Amino acid sequence: MSFSSVKALLTQYSPVSESSFSDAEKEAQIPLGQDKDLELHSDGRSSAAPSSRPEKKSFVDARVISDAIIGLSDGMTVPFALTAGLSTLEDTKVVVFGGMAELIAGAISMGLGGYLGAKSEEQSYRTTLKQTREQTLTDFDATTTIISDIFAPYDLPAQTVSDLTKHLVDSPNLPEFLMNFHHTLPEPSGSRAVTCALTIALGYFIGGFVPLVPYFFVGPDDAFSALKWSIAVMAVALFVFGYGKTCFVTGWKGRENVKGGVYGGVQMVIVGGVAAGAAMGLVKLFQVLAR
């Protein structure tokens, strides 16, 4: 990989300014992903041939998916375990009111936890960025050492690393470069905290509301019979959630991916079943002790 190619990579995937490169160097820049499509000219120069490969863009932020999984996984286990335990009292109103109270309180708690966590992440980024900017201004030797360490795993020639270091040290975007490649901290979105809170809270409420649905269609003293329908509904919901969560990460097609999805679905059913069984056992134990 040539010096100009490395700088082109940094220009495209880091905040390094193109203004620090000469016009000749800019013309020699090769976008990442086109190294295999190079055309060699008779004078030894290389140029990137147009690539027909379509770019894959993600329309859903991975962090949002992660937050939704956190909310749904907790919502499908904790409220289900609570309603299953309350069902042993055989009072539908107690189950519904207790379940709804837990759902609302749990969703608020989970949402606030996500909000505060995202705010802490944002504050951590700002503090680290401030310290990094101060370091680049006051400690030249440490900064150059960090830059060299960033390129060390790529086995670049020493002269190339030296030239890159000189360009980066003079770049006004050096702190952002270090945040990306040294601290590996992406800049958080301004709406990250609110989005995180709403996603987790909504996921928790939706996941927890599923086991409550059968209790709305039975009599006041038929809570235990509604529990049977609740278990069946939750078994299906947990399996679908576990299967979808696993395949979303590994892929949907292929025998191995399907097997992994089935394993993830069964795992979620077992976890939810253990939680519900433990809750029911504890409620029965408390009833015995209260006599």
Image (spheres, rainbow, N blue to C red):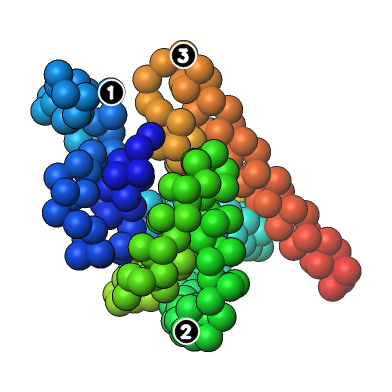
Q: Residue 58 location, x and y as percent?
A: 26, 45
Q: From this view, report whether residue 181 is shown above or below residue 179.
A: above
Q: Earlier in the sequence, mark 2 or mark 1?
A: 1
The three-letter code of the residue at mark 2 reads Leu
Give the mark nearer the N terminus: 1 vs 3: 1
User: Horizontally, is 27 left or right of 3 in the view?
Assistant: left
Q: Is residue 209 above or below residue 115?
A: above
Left/right of residue 152 with respect to residue 270 in the rendered view: left
Which percent across, then down, holds residue 287?
80, 66
Q: Amino acid at mark 1?
A: Lys
Read off the residue under disc 3. Answer: 255
Would you name the residue on which mark 2 appears?
137
Residue 253 can be seen in this image:
yes
Gap in angstroms between the C-alphas marked 1 and 3: 31 Å
The answer to which of marks 2 and 3 sits earlier in the sequence is 2
Q: Secondary structure at mark 3?
A: helix
**Regarding mark 1 in the picture, which secondary structure is present there?**
helix
Numbered-mark total: 3
Residue linked to disc 1: 36
Q: CA distance from mark 2 to mark 3?
A: 55 Å
Say which residue appears at 47% left-offset and 22% top-offset.
Answer: 257
**Is residue 240 something that shows in the picture?**
no
Image height of 256 relative to 233, above or below: above
Q: Residue at x 32, y 50 (%)?
A: 7
